[in-house]
Image: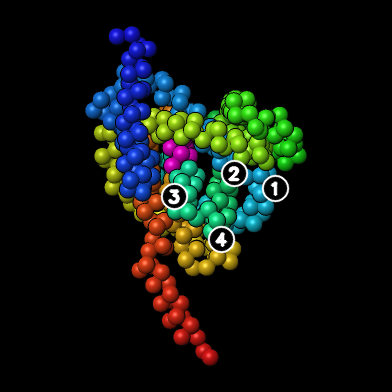
Amino acid sequence: MHDTTLLLIEVGALLLVLSLLGRVALRFGVSPIPLYLLAGLTVGHGGVLPLQASQDFFEVGSEIGVILLLAMLGLEYSPSELVRNLKQSRLAGVLDALLNAIPGAAFALLLGWGPVAAVTLAGVTWVSSSGVVAKVLRDLRRLSNRETPVILSVLVIEDLAMAFYLPVLSALVIGAGLLQGATTVVVAVTVVVVILFAALRFGKVLSRLFPAQSPEPLLLGVLGLTMLVAGLAEQVSVSAAVGAFLVGIAISGQVAHNATVVLAPLRDLFATVFFVFFGIATDPADIVPVILPALALAVVTIATKTLGGYIAARRAGIGVPGSWRTGLTLTPRGEFSIVIAGLAVGAGIEPMLAPLATAYVLITVIAGPLLARIPDATWFKNAVRNRRLATEASEPV
C-alpha cells in the first residue's frame, strides 16, 4: 500500500476514535486529555496497534498544537491586563513556584537522577495546564466568578516564567558551558522583553493589519504571524510556545475576539494531536514501573498547588469557598509539563522522565477536574458554613 494512502487511513481512523473518546469524556464530565494520551500509548512504540506511516504527521501536528494552545491563551489578555495581573499577583507567583517546583526537584534527587533532571522535574510539577484549567472554568461556568482573575493571573505568571525557564533548561540539557548558557538566557530574555514592549506599544497597530470581519484572511494572517514568530523565537532559544503566547498578547480588540472564534477548531484539532503524539512517543511498558512514584508525586503536588492557590485567593480578598475553588482548579498539569519532559528526554538526560511525566499528567488531569467540583458539593458547603458558625460562636462578644 502506498505510504500516503496508509497515512490517510491511519490518521482518519485515529481521528474517528478520538472523536468517540472525546464524546465519552464529555458524557462523564472529565477532561479528554488522559483518553487522548491513552490512545497515543495504544498506537505508539510498544502499543497494541503501532502506527506505521503517520508518526511524522503527528510529530509536526504536535508542534502546531502547542503553538496554538499558547497563542489562544494569549488572545484572552490585553497587554494592559497582563501588566496589571503581574503587578497584583507577583507574590502569588513566587509562592506558587516555590511550593510546586521544590517537590519535583527533591523527588528527582531522591530517585538519583541528578541535578539536571531535578531542574526538569521541578518544571513538570510547577506549571498548571492552562488548557485544562480554562476548560474546567468553562465547563463549570465559573468564568465570571470573583476568583477567576486570580486563577488566570497565576497561569499568566507561570506561562511567562517559562520564557526564562525553558532557555535555562535548554542550556542545561545540551550541556552548554557557563558562557554559552548565560548568552542563551540573555538572548532569550531580551527577545521576550522586546516582544512584550512591542505588544504594549504597538499592539493596536498590529491588530489593524488583520481584517476583523473577514474570517479567511484573519485566520491566515494570525496563524501565519503566530507560526512565524514562534519559529523565530525557537531559533534564538526561546520556546516557540512562549513566542506564540506573546503574539496572542499583542493582538487585541475585535481582532482578538474574532481570531479566537476562527482559530478554535484548529486549536482543538492540533492540541489533540499534541497529546496523542506524546503518548505515541512513550512505551507503555516504561510507565508500569513509575506508576507508584507518579502517584506519590501527584498527591504531594496537588496538595501544594491547592495550598498556593488558596493563599493567593485569600490575599486577594476572596472568601473561603472561592479560595478552595482557586487552589483545586489549578491542580491539573498538562501541555508544558509534557513539553519540558520531552525536551529533556530528547537530549538523552533521563529516559524515565517521559513515562513518569505521562503517568503524572494522566493522574493530575483526571483528578484535577474532579477535585475542582468539590467546593460546589452540598457537604462541602455545609462544612464551610458550620466551620464559620463555630468560629463566630467562639469569638468573644
**CA neighbours of label 2 inside 10 A, class few (<14), some (14 to 19), many (20+):** some
Along the horizontal axis of the image, is 86 left or right of 9?
right
Q: Is residue 312 magenta?
A: no
Image: 156 above or below 325: above
Q: Secondary structure at mark 3?
A: helix
Q: Nearer the viewer, mark 3 or mark 1?
A: 3
Q: Residue at x 26, y 39 (%)?
A: 288
Instruction: Please name which of the two marks, 3 or 4, marks the residue nearer to the observer.
Output: 3
Q: Residue furthest bottom?
A: 397
Residue 332 horizontal/vertical position (percent): 42, 48
The residue shown at (34%, 43%) is 25
Identify the image quadrant of the N terminus. top left
Q: Tag on residue 139? A: 3
* Label 2 – label 4 distance at C-alpha: 17 Å
Distance from disc 3 to disc 4, alpha carbons, whole Å, reads 16 Å
Magenta residues, as a range?
334-343
Asked whether residue 78 appears in the rendered view, the answer is: yes
- Look at the numbered disc 2 and give the secondary structure of its residue: loop
Sequence-first tag of 3 and 1: 1
Q: Are marks 2 and 1 in contact (CB under 8 Å)?
A: no
Other residues around mark 3 within 10 Å, as few (<14) / some (14–19) / many (≥20)? some
The residue most toward the top is 2
Label 4 and label 1: CA atoms lie apart by: 19 Å
Residue 76's mark?
A: 2
Task: Please report whichever mark, 3 or 4, sits nearer to the chain's N-terminal start.
Answer: 3
Q: Quadrant of residue 95?
A: bottom right
Q: Which residue is mark 1?
A: 80
Examine the structure image and report whether residue 341 is included in the region drawn in magenta.
Answer: yes
At 34% from the left and 33% from the top, the residue drawn is: 18
